[in-house]
Amino acid sequence: MQTLAASRPLSHPAPHGAPDRDDEIKLIGVAKSFTRDQEIYGEGEAADFVYKVVSGAVRSMRLLADGRRQITGFHLAGDVFGVEIGVDRRASAEALTDAVVIVARRATLTEIDQGARLWRHALAELDRSRDHVLTLGRRSAAERVASFLVEMAERTHAGGELTLPMSRQDMADFLGLTIETVSRTLTKLQADGLIEIRCCRVVRLRRPNALAELCE
Amino acid sequence: MQTLAASRPLSHPAPHGAPDRDDEIKLIGVAKSFTRDQEIYGEGEAADFVYKVVSGAVRSMRLLADGRRQITGFHLAGDVFGVEIGVDRRASAEALTDAVVIVARRATLTEIDQGARLWRHALAELDRSRDHVLTLGRRSAAERVASFLVEMAERTHAGGELTLPMSRQDMADFLGLTIETVSRTLTKLQADGLIEIRCCRVVRLRRPNALAELCE
DNA sequence: CGCGAGCTTGACGCATCTCAAACTTAGTGG
DNA sequence: CCACTAAGTTTGAGATGCGTCAAGCTCGCG
C-alpha cells in the first residue's frame, strides 16, 4: 500500500527555513512517498509511527459512520503529524498531493531528548485546533473561507498569490461547509474585490486586510 | 477581582479518584476561590499562571469582535487549564459555578520534572478539541447535544442522572448553536424517550446507548 | 479534439436562527 | 410562608443561510 521510495535513514532536513526557536522536532526515520489521495494511515490502526512532511501536503480527518467527513488539519512541508496520545489512531491521514514524508517509529520521539519540543508542538496544534473550533462554531461561510485563505497564505508564506494544495471538497470538509457553498463564497469574495481567482487553485488576495477583518 | 480564599500552599489533592496512569499534573501553588461568572483570566493578558480545578467548574472561551462567543472547553474538578504555548492568553476563562482552583506560576510546571505528563496532557486536550471540531463541523443539533450529554456523563462519572454545571447559553456557545435550538433539541430528545429532564440542569439519560449511537 | 473530473451556477428546501412572548425557577423581601 | 421579581428556559412563528439536487461549464489530459 505504501510505496517505498527511498530507504535512506535521515534526520530531518530543516524544511522551510529555520524555525523561530529551536522548535523543530527531530525524527529519525525513512522517507516514503505517497501518491495523491493515498492513505498514510487509517482510523483504528496502531499508532506506531509518526510523520513529517518533506514535500507535498497531507490531510488528517475523521469520518462519521454515514460517511460525513471532517478534515481536522492540513499538513505542509515541515509539519509533523500523526502524534497520538493513545495506542490507536483516532483519525486517518491521506496525501493531499503527491508527497514525501519521513516515517519514524513512535518511540524514537521520546528516545532522543526533546520533551519540551514535543510539548510545544502539541500546544501549538492545540492552539490551532481551538481556532478551528471557533471558526466552525461561530463564523459564517464567508468568514470561514476568509480565515482559511488568510491562514493558508500565512503558512505557505504566500506573498499575495496563493496556490492551494487542496480541492474544493477538501476545503469544504475542513470548513464544515459543502463544496457548493465554498465555491459560491469564493465567487462572492471575488465579486467584492477581496480576492481574485486566477484558476481553481490559485488565488490572489487583493485586500488581505479586508479579509483579515472578516475574521475579526 | 480575584477573591483570595486561602493561601496555604498545597500540592494537588488528587481530585476525583486516582487517574489510570500517573498522568496527574502536579501544581505547586495557592488555592483561590471564584464566584459564578467571575473572570479567572482574560484574552490578551500575560499567561503567567496555570490552573487546576479543585471544586466547581470553569469555562474557557474565545470571543469575536461583535460579541459572538465560542466556549472551547469546560473544566471540571481535577482538570488543569490555562496552559498556553505563547506569552499571552488566546482565550479567557471564567468560573461556571462558584469554584476553587489552584493557581501556580507557569514556570513551576517545567521546574518539577514532569515533561511526559505535560505532553500527554496537551495531547489529550488536542484529542478532545478535535472531537469538538468534528462535532461542530459535521454534526446536526441533535447529534451535538447527544454527544455533549454523553461526554459530560462520562466526565462526571454520572450513573444515569447527570447534573450539568452550565446554563443553556453555555451549552449553546460550546455546541455552536443558539440557546433556543439547544432547548428545543433537549425537549425533542425527551419526547423521543432518550432523556428525561428532571429540572433544567438535571438530566437522566434513559437510553444512553441510543444517545451514543446518535454520535456514531 | 473529446472525455472526464472538478468546479460553478441555479432553483428550491430545510435546519437552524431570529424575534417575541409565555412560562418556570430561584432568589428576595414583606 | 407567600408575594414579588429577575433570571433563565421553553415555546411559537417567521426569516434566512446554507444544504440538496440538478445542470452546465472549464480545463487538464489522453
Image (cartoon, coloured by chain):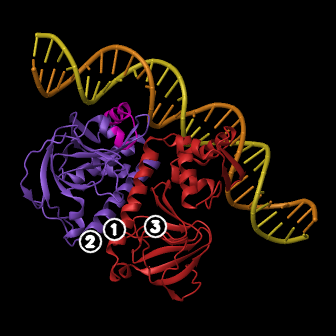
Chain colours: A purple, B red, C yellow, D orange
CB contact under 8 Å: marks 3 and 1:
no
The subunit carrying tag 1 is: B
- The structure residue drawn at horizontal position 52% and vertical position 54%, both measured from the top left corner, is B174
- The structure residue drawn at horizontal position 50% and vertical position 56%, both measured from the top left corner, is B67
Q: Which residue is mark 2?
A: A115
The subunit carrying tag 3 is: B
Spatial separation of the CA atoms under disc 1 and disc 2: 8 Å
Instruction: Please state the horizontal and vertical placement of residue D9, each as a whole percent of the image.
Output: 68, 51
Label 1 amino acid? Trp
Of residues A215 and A94, the one nearer the viewer is: A94
Label 2 amino acid? Gly
Q: Main secondary structure of the magenta part?
A: helix
Segment tinted magenta in the rendering: A172-188
Instruction: Please state the horizontal and vertical placement of residue B33, each as a whole percent of the image.
Output: 58, 78
Spatial separation of the CA atoms under disc 3 and disc 1: 16 Å
Label 3 amino acid? Asp
Q: Which residue is mark 3?
A: B20
Spatial separation of the CA atoms under disc 3 and disc 2: 22 Å
CB contact under 8 Å: marks 1 and 2:
yes
Q: Does A175 lie within the magenta span? A: yes
Q: Which residue is mark 1?
A: B119
User: Is B11 situated left or right of A120 in this image?
Assistant: right
